[in-house]
Amino acid sequence: MGIGKHSDFTETQKESLRKKSLGELGELYVIKTLVDHGFDCIRNINDDYMNEKFADIICEKDKTRFVVSVKSRNMYQLDGSLNTRYNLGQKVCEKAKYAEEKYDAVAHWMAIQFDINHYSVYFGSLESLGGSTGIPISKCQSGEVETILVNRKRHYFDFEFYKNRGPLSFL
């Protein structure tokens, strides 16, 4: 079964591959964004430990070390409505505390939002979410929650593979 032969995959496998690829793409864009905004000592934890509790990226800025959970999503849902909330997962506070202790860092999140031609990146602390387990994207877009690092910047890759899919879209 070759990766180029999409007909060899089930729809579930194709959707899983699409989501995993979107997450990896998001992590690459996040690393570029961190560099562009003066962060240093940037490391993708997934290179060493897949599925680490809470953490995807470690970085530093102004003598503060951050452990960051990255959430990459399509800007729009399948029905065309805004994808308004990026879930950080169950027990996010417990997992973030574990990551803070393990990496001697402050837990933050980064949400990267893609559409067909643009991307945006939002950065914030867990405290800014007021106990919620999700990142409120509309509040990020308006600047009500934390920091907009990138606002609708043009990307230059073919987004077709990453778009949300209907049940028969891979056929």
Image (cartoon, rainbow, N blue to C red):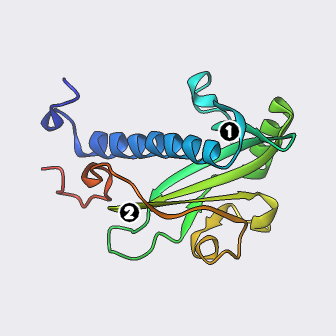
Q: Which residue is mark 1?
A: 55
Which residue is drawn at the image coordinates 77% and 57% (left, top)?
A: 126
Which residue is drawn at the image coordinates 25% and 54% (left, top)?
A: 160
Q: Secondary structure at mark 1?
A: loop
Which residue is drawn at the image coordinates 58% and 40% (left, top)?
A: 31
Is 116 displayed left or right of 141 in the figure? left
- Name the amino acid, label 2: Asp
Residue 81, given in percent of the width and then of the height, sits at 39, 77
Q: Nearer the viewer, mark 2 or mark 1?
A: 2
Residue 6, located in which quarter of the rendered image? top left
Residue 141, located in which quarter of the rendered image? bottom right
- Name the amino acid, label 1: Ala
Residue 170 visible at all:
yes
Residue 80, given in percent of the width and then of the height, sits at 34, 75
**Whether label 2 touches label 1, CB < 8 Å:** no
Task: Say whether disc 2 or disc 1 marks the residue closer to the N-terminus.
Answer: 1
Is 72 displayed left or right of 18 in the figure? right
Cα separation, mark 2 vs mark 1, equals 25 Å
Residue 24, given in percent of the width and then of the height, sits at 46, 39
Where does the N terminus fall, quadrant-wise? top left
Front one among 34 and 50: 34
Residue 39, located in which quarter of the rendered image? top right
Which numbered dot is residue 115?
Answer: 2
